[in-house]
Structures are given as structure tokens and as C-alpha cells.
Image (spheres, rainbow, N blue to C red):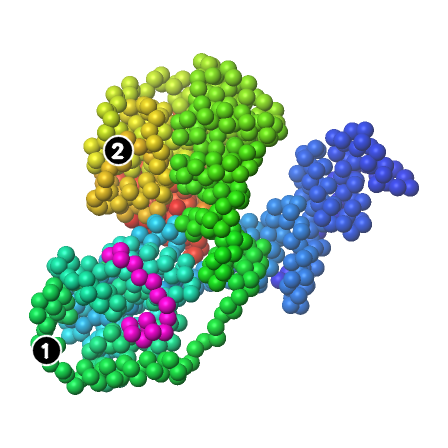
Amino acid sequence: MARFRGVLRAGGDRPMRNDPDPVKAHRRALAADPAEAVSWQRLALEAYRAGKGRQALSLFVRAARLHGDGAVLERQIEGVITPALNQAVVLMQNGRVDEAAAVIEPLTEVIAPRGDFAHVLGVLRLVQGRDDEAARFHAASRMEDNGLGVALAGIARHRVDYDVIGTVVIPVHRMEDTIERALDSVLAAVRYHRAASGEVGAQVHVCVVDDASPDDTVARALRWARTHPEQSVAVIANNRNRGAGRTRNAGAAASLGRYLWFLDADDHYLEHHLFLTIQALDAAPEMGFVRTGIVFDGIDAEITQEWRQASENCYPGNLCVRRECHDRIGGFPEEAPFHPAVADDVAYSRALHARFGGLKFSEKTVHYTMRPGNALERQRAEMTGGPPSAERQKPDSRFVAIELLTQRRLYSLATNAIPRPPSPPMDAAVWLEKGKGLIRDRQPEPAVDALVRAAALDPANATVWFELGLAANGLRRDALALRGFQAVASLHPDAGAARFNLASLRFEQGALDPAARHLRDALALRPEHGGSLFLLGRTERRRGQAGIAYRTLSRAVRVEPELGEIRAERAEAALALGRATEAMEHARRALALAPALFDGHTALAGALEALGRPDAALPGWERAIRCNPGRGEAFTRRAVTLLLRRYGPPPLPAPRAETGRRLASTPLGQHGRFGNQLLQYGVLRLYAARHGLTLEVPPWPGRHLYGLDDPLPGPTLPRLPEREVETSVMASLSGAGGEALADHDVTAYFCGDTSFLAPHREAFRGFFTPGPRIRPWTDALTTRLRAAGRTVVALHIRRGDFGWGPFWMAPESWYLRWLDAVWPGLDRPVLYVATDDLRCLSAFAAYRPLSARDLAEPIPGAEFLTDFHVLCEADLVAVSNSSFSFVATMLNRRARSVVRPDKARQALLPYDPWSAPVLL
């Protein structure tokens, strides 16, 4: 690590006057004029000379806000930061990492790290093992070719290869006809788990173990693995037949991750198997395994209850077991006479059940296939209530031997003949403090694991459940957060805070009825709690109860008169009641309290529109966008206003359907901006068509741009939670049955895996054909684009509202490396850069890039359309981690290559827009 050089200069400041106490003199000057930038700057210099670096930084920043000279600020803060960085580097080199952190961490509370500051912080976090933070600071440093970047890339690659949840072991022998179906079912289950858990990067390894198959089984497994590079697969082989038990043990020995599954190659998983078993064991760390129900091929409806229970308790295919538990019982027995594979699964299960606690779900998640000669086919008659099979009609000395050896195994386990690893601490208080410490260290995932252990050890401890609820909510693990807050409410029924937390979570999930119920319970305990009144008012407004919402919010204003958010919400409630003038006054009061309040600006603009003053409303929408560019409502309302001004009214809305055939999405345009709006609309239109429903949507840009004429929303319909909507709609479009969501108001982002849309791609694309009003503009744009070069390469570089949470930014260097690789082989290529920050064009100057300003006059209200249309038309496309460009590649019919940034590989990688998660 190198040291850094820097100097402290005061810019063009005048020399200070002689004064016995210059600090007091500057403060007197500021008392007379608080906007006197020079005095703030000189106070900062005095703080710096006194060794108060953090205070000096704060004062320099305050002065810069007044004088506006960014260059002076850069020089001054460099003089404060550089010595601190050099000191931290020396401390780290001497192994005093925590002391280094104490030197530079306080500075981050004053200014955002970048450049050398971000680099040193990144190195510090890497040494501390906080890799995600290290990667974030590395990106902020904009330093690509250095040791930190190489180290992070290596760690990321290692994670891709080894950071997996567990391994599915598939023993195979003569299974060429079914191995691909089994592998397909694992991949489908992995995708389902990613979508259902929200963990889009979750990985499950597969280990196929060939037991000396004489047929084409191995070749087919290898072919499948090579055509599915996104799924981690290993294929290993026995050189002679060793039996299923030994083969499973070989796969377990080569496994990765904490869990093991065993799938026979002629059986297959139902898609929710992995999700259900992972969730169960993650939530119950004291349990060693979980079993699920089985679909018995051909005889499932006839099998006797006794046989179902016996089979489900010993068949390995429905089992998920912790790797350490498998190891502690010695795996599947390999001694004679178990070999080759006679009752070894029964002995394994008995040992597992005797040694560890487990869970059992009746839900069927595995399909057990009947094949000539397999166990299910041989025992079919008995399992459906017929006479015993021939092998069970008389005692067999071999089965007696197996029973004796099973008893020997159980005895060995009971007397600790098999060494156990040291047990973890069993004190709930220890795990609670560990969890709190991990939260303070910003390590939420291990914190949740620690708190889950604490809850299992002390389920009556409300503090544990409260901390677990908060931590799980921060990770968007809604089911676990809900369980935590419900436990607190159950343990302390008189605690209003627990009810409020429950309500907040249910509101975020879109479960408005339960949220309202919990809020009323909270208010019964604390009638004057402003937060509960505010959230209840907001909830009731979204439930269509504008009158109740307005009265509740009026109470909230009396309790919390200084909160602009409450006044803005009351303005929205007044607007819903048709009281536009009153809404305008409430909104203005909200903005007087909080001038940068997004909801205040949208409420005021909405009221002005309702009063027939769209031109006066337009600046309000634009101010709201500046306050929060990522929120969709202001973006949509501005776009609709300007498109209406340019083109006049969109096509007349079609009539609404009768009751029983309605499907509304009133939040369309509020949640997500243009790309995600297309995704939401397209998915819901497909779902409505599948079930014979008519989709109702509010005004949004798609009406003008694509000539869409869906009915406007009619009478209020009950709202469903987003998760419930997303799960139901995705399942339906994947071909599953289920009751239609008729006569409901629905919304969801649908940013998970797009595989469920693949069969409907042409219908989806058909919704978004440019309408007659903009077709001449798009045709002219395409003509100019094609005239610029024979091969159009389009990049999407998203900057403005990105850089937080899942909306991370990939550096320009990733795109440049990709361009360097593909450009030489292209026929007369031309580069187009779609971006909301034109400063990034300089990085691609060597390719002489085009941008939106070079091709077309922007359409007011749809300035984004130039970029979007080019992304839909280009021959090669490199997107950002954004639904805007991802959806464009879904609509692109001619692209022969599409790539996206991969955080783990630190590069652009190919993807299939119809079989990939929208956001990574």
C-alpha cells in the first residue's frame, strides 16, 4: 500500500487579521452574517491546525456550500484526509487494523469516500473480511487495475464456485433415458428458490456420480451440464459398480455447501422442493434434517397410509440433511451385506432419525417414478393393500443380518463411537449478543443466523424475536420478519410497538387488511401514537377508504403537527375525496415544513391537475423528480402531461368488463419507471388474457407511445399483497392451474427470473409496437441509426438514480474490456451509448460513440425513448443492471448477442432475456 501526498490551501482567501483569539473573531463574524463563507473556511483552518480533522472537514464542506468553489474544497479536504490515510496505511502495514479503522472511519460521516479515500477504506474492509463493503468502496475509488481489484475479483470468483447452499447428489446407473429430466427438475427448483426467496444469486451444486453405467448416461449428463453453464455441476465416476449407498457417499464427499439432497436419476423434484427444505432448515438450526411428501407414480391415490409413512421416512429422495449430520452418522452403510444397495437407505434413515431431530412436511415435492424392476414397482401390490411380496413371505437370513448391522450402527452412535464436532454455545443470551454485534458490524446475514439460534434456544424471549424481526426485515426475508414480530406481539399483547412493527411489515408486503387490523390494535394500546395514526391513514387510503383515511390523518396532524409527511398524506386523502382546493392547501403546508418532500410535491401537483391547471402542476412533478428520481409516480405524471400536450388525448379507453371479469392495476406508473412499467403491464396483460379478464390501468405513457386502450380503473377493488400476486401470476403463466385473481387490484415488479414468460414472448412483444403517432419518429430514428454503420453496438450506462441497494453500477472499464474483445470482428461497427449521464461518453471516446442527441430531437415527456428504441434495434447490446435495458433486450428481435454486468465475475457475461433474472 502506498502513501499519499496532499497539501492544505485556503484558495484565494485574504490573510487573517491579527487577533488574540481568531476563533472567537470568526464566530462573531458569523453571528452577524451566517452566510459568510470566508469565516467558515477560516474556522475550518483553525480546527485543522488544532488537529481536529473531522471538525475541519465538516466546516470546509459547510463553507463550500456557500462559496460553491469545488476546486478549493477538493484541495482543502485533501489536506485533512491525506495525513489520516497515510497514518491508517502505516497502522495496517503493522497489523494494527482496528486502530487504522478508528482513524479514518469517522471521516466517512462527513464526506462520501472516493478516490484514494475510498481505496484505503476498501483495503481496510478487505482485511477485515467485509468483502461487500470493500467492493463498494473499490467501485467508488474508480481505480481498476490495482491489488484490491484483483483480490476482490478472486474472492468473487471463489464465491461463484464455492459459496453454495448445498449439493444435490444424483447416483446413476443405466439412466440415460431419465438423467436429463432429473437435472432439469433440479434447475427448475433452483430457479424457483431464487424467485421465491428473493436471493437471485443463490446457488445449489449438483454432483452426478456414475456407478459404472454401460450406456450413454455419463455422456448425456455431461452434455446437459455443458449446455447449462449457469448451473454448477460435477460429474464423477466409479470404475466398477459399487451400489447406490457407496455412490451417494462418494457424491457427498465431493459436495459443497451446508445441505445435502439425494435424488435418484429416474425420479424428479417438483419446483418448490429446494425452497421448502432450505427455508425449513434455515429457520430451525436445531434440526438435523427435513423430509417432505412424495408423489408415488401411478399409485399415489391408492397407497395405504402405513406404506406412505414408511416410505417417506426412509426414501432418500425427499430428504434434505445437514452435511455435518450426514458425516456424523458415517453416511450410508457400506459394509456387507448392505452392498450392493440392499436396505442401506433404511439403515441410514434409522441412524439419522435416532441421532438428530427432524421436520416432516406433508406437502408433496418429489415425484417417485415407477419403473420395471425398481422398488416401487416390486412393492406396488403391498403398497396399495395387496398381499405381501415374495421377498417378505418368509424370513431371509440376509435381512436378519441387515437388522443386526443396523442395530450395531445405532449402538455405536449412541455410545459416541463416531466423533462429534464441538457443540456450539447453547446459551440464548450469547447468540443474542453475537447477533447484535454482527448487526453493528453491518453483517446482516450472519446476524440473522445467530438470532435464529437464540430464538430456538429461548423462544419466550421477546427481545430476541424483536431483533430477529428487524434484521430479517432489513434483508427482505418477509416470512421470517413476520414470524419475529408476531412472536413479540404474542409474548407481549399489550405492547403497541410490536403491533406497529407487524403493521409496517404487512403494509410493505401489500397486505393492507392485516396491516389495518394490527394498527387498530396498536392504537387501542396507544391512542395518540402519531406513527400508527399516520400509517393507518395511509393504509386506509390505499384500501379505497378515503373518508376514514382523512379523519385518521387529521388526528395524526394534531399529534405530530411538525411532520410534513403526515400533512402530505392528508392532502392525498382530501384529493381522493374530491376536495382539490383543500388538498392544495394541505400540500403547501407540508412543503413549508419539508421543502424537499417528494410526497408534498406530488400531492400539490396532483391537486393542481384536479383543479384543471396542468401547466401549473408540471413544475411540481419536475420538483418531485429532483427530490427522488427513482420514484415512478412523478416520472409518469410528467410524461403523461407532456405527451398529452404534444399529441392530444390517447386512444379512447375500451369499456370495462362486468363484475367477475375485472382485473385492475391502479399502482401502474407509481411503482417503477418506464422499463419496469412495461414489464408489469405486459405480464398482467398476458395473465388477464389467459383467464378471460379485462385489465384496467390508469393513464401511463404506454397509452400514447403504443396506442394501448385498456379501460381506466373503475370502482375500487380489494388489493392483494405483491408477493401473493407475483407467485400466483408467475405460476399461472408457467402453466399451473389455480383460481384466477378476478375482481382484484394487483401489482408486482416481476423482476425475478423471466423463464415463465418465454412461451409468451411474441404476445408480450406485440403489446409494445410503436403506435401510429410515434411510428414516423421511430422509423426515421431507425433509418438514421442504420445509416451510421452496418453493425450497431449499444451500451446502457445507468448512473443518475443508481448506486444503492440492488441498483448497483458497473464501471465503464467492464464495458471497455468487452468492446475490445468484440469490436475487431464486427462489420463496420458503430457504437451508441444510452446514458443519463453524458460525462461517461468520454470513457468511450476512442470508439467515437453516438448518443441520443446525435440521432433525434427528443419527444417531450418521453426523452428516454431514443435510448430505449436504439436498445431495441441494436445488433449487440450491453445492458446495465436495470429493468430499462433488460426489457429492451426482451423486445429486441435482431440482437445476436446480449451481455450484462456480473458482480461476481467483474465482467460482462452473456444472458438470455427470456431465462434470467431482471435484476441481479
Asked if residue 653 can be seen in this view, the reply is: yes
How crowded is the residue under tag 1: few (<14 C-alpha within 10 Å), some, or many (20+)?
Answer: few
Q: Position of residue 588 (x, y in %)?
A: 57, 21
How crowded is the residue under tag 2: few (<14 C-alpha within 10 Å), some, or many (20+)?
Answer: many
Q: Position of residue 871 (x, y in %)?
A: 35, 38
Q: In the rendered structure, which amino acid carries the disc numbered 2?
A: Ala
Disc 1/disc 2 C-alpha distance (Å): 57 Å
The residue under the point 88% across, 41% down is 21
Q: Is residue 118 above or below residue 421?
A: above
The residue under the point 44% across, 19% down is 577
Q: Quadrant of the N terminus?
A: bottom right
The residue pinned by badge 1 equals: 393
Q: Is residue 3 above or below residue 350?
A: above
**In the displayed structure image, the side of residue 813 where residue 693 appears, left or right:** left
Q: In the rendered structure, which amino acid carries the disc numbered 1?
A: Gln
The residue pinned by badge 2 equals: 742
Choose top left, top right, bottom left or bottom right for residue 39: top right
In front: 124, or 654?
Answer: 654
Residue 882 covered by magenta stretch: no
Q: Which residue appears farthest toward the top when viewing the image?
A: 612
The residue under the point 59% across, 26% down is 558
Mark toward the start of the polypeptide (1 vs 2):
1
> Magenta span covers which residues?
349-365
**In the displayed structure image, the side of residue 258 where residue 620 appears, left or right:** right
Q: Is residue 797 above or below residue 707?
A: below
- For label 1, the SS is loop
In front: 897, or 748?
Answer: 748
What's the mark number on residue 331?
Answer: none
The residue under the point 42% across, 63% down is 285
